[in-house]
Amino acid sequence: MSKKDLSSLELTDLTELMKQEGQPAFRAKQIFEWIHKRGVNTFSDMSNLSKELREKLEEKYSLANIKMVKKYVSKEDNTTKYLFDVGNDNIIESVLMSYEYGNSVCISSQVGCRMGCKFCASTIDGLERNLSAGEMLAQVYEIQKDIDVRISNIVIMGTGEPLDNYDNLLKFIKLINAKDGLNIGQRHITVSTCGIIEKIYDLVNEDLQITLALSLHAPNDDIRKQIVPTAKSNEIGDLLKAMKFYADKTKRRITIEYALIDGVNDSKDNALELTEKLKGIMCHVNLIPVNEIEERDYKRSNTERTNTFAEILKQYNLETTVRRKLGADINAACGQLRRSYKK
Ligand code: SAH
């Protein structure tokens, strides 16, 4: 039987568990801070616990353990990409991006992905397994230890579909937000989804303040079904209704992500159709000229088409930004680096 992982437990659950172990309540808080404030991943490092307790914990419990295997620093911008081994040679990737307003970490939520988006490298070998909340947190903690500056923003936009690992995602959000942990505000957390309608409604009920980003990538179902297979059971009308519901209920502006692919979804008509679809929704549109991956022949939309597309959205009062490539020299696009390392 596998040992119970303490790094995925909220403080209340850890307190309950330590109580059962005959420990006073403050013991749970000490352990919690070691894990979530100091990023310690072995019991033996928890130096304010007795040796006897450390040995007992070691015997009965585990801690998420991920090991940095590679680090790539972009020469073009302030992007650093990390590869972590999560056991059994499973590699995940995380990205650190430094901006004027702070440091943002993009984490993976699964090893691989089963959503099948046609332009995405993460999904080519399918899903290997979910990451635990502790393993999602550990990506942030390891990077924090590596750079020794405060991380202020989290985006869950690396490999995997976060809403396909829903329970662990929620634990992650609560733990990264915990007062005795890194205490990163929910408004500084963005979850990106390819759009699983019933999970979006579930998320509304959690009453969170996180930003929800939808990977829309198309103005209509015909195009979307060609590039995002989950579109077959999640039609745009229903999807945007769910996203609007999220925005209205939480009063949080949603993000619409749109990867521009040459000749597939980047025409003027596509832009006009998109403005129709987004009418009345409190949103920000993020246009991303698609990163070309070796295994697929989708081409990036050129600068002129990209700019025209953006201009049309702006004319219709949609707040729009074009995300230029970050870390292109280090294969920073979703899933690319992990693949090239595996090969
Ligand atoms: N599964 C989630 C989060 C991971 S993907 C989602 O679909 O949102 C994060 C974002 O990167 C998504 O918008 C995804 O569509 C986009 N993406 C993946 N591969 C890409 C590529 N080659 N070029 C541009 N964007 C890409």
Image (cartoon, helix red, strand yellow):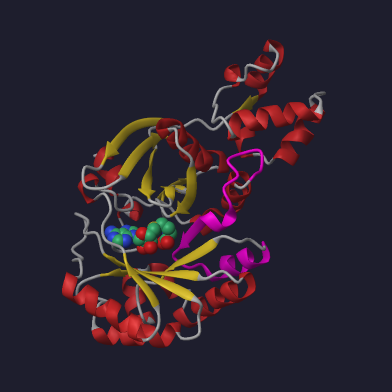
Q: How far across and down, in percent of the image, does residue 195 sit?
A: 48, 68
Please provide the residue range marked out in magenta. Answer: 178-206
In which quadrant of this rendering is ligand 1 seen? bottom left
Q: How far across and down, in percent of the image, does residue 44 sit?
A: 59, 16
Q: Is residue 287 magenta?
A: no
User: Which residue of the protein is positioned furthest toward the top in this rendering?
Assistant: 51
Q: In this rendering, is residue 17 above or below 276?
A: above
Residue 7 quadrant: top right
Q: In this rendering, is residue 136 above or below 215?
A: above
Taking the spot 21% from the left edge, 42% from the top edge, the residue there is 75
Q: How far across and down, in percent of the image, does residue 173 sit?
A: 59, 50
Question: Is residue 263 something one can see in this rendering?
Answer: no
Number of disc labels = 0
Q: How far across and down, in percent of the image, does residue 247 sit?
A: 57, 73
Taking the spot 80% from the left edge, 30% from the top edge, the residue there is 25
Taking the spot 71% from the left edge, 39% from the top edge, the residue there is 11
Residue 263 quadrant: bottom left
Is residue 211 toward the left or the right of residue 60 in the image?
left
User: Which residue of the protein is positioned furthest toward the front in this rendering?
Assistant: 100
Using the image as rendered, state which of residue 208 and residue 147 is in the foreground. 147
Question: Is residue 156 something one can see in this rendering?
Answer: yes
Q: In this rendering, is residue 85 above or below 303?
A: above
Looking at the rendered image, the quarter that the C terminus falls into is top left
Looking at the rendered image, the quarter that the N terminus falls into is top right
Using the image as rendered, state which of residue 254 and residue 195 is in the foreground. 254
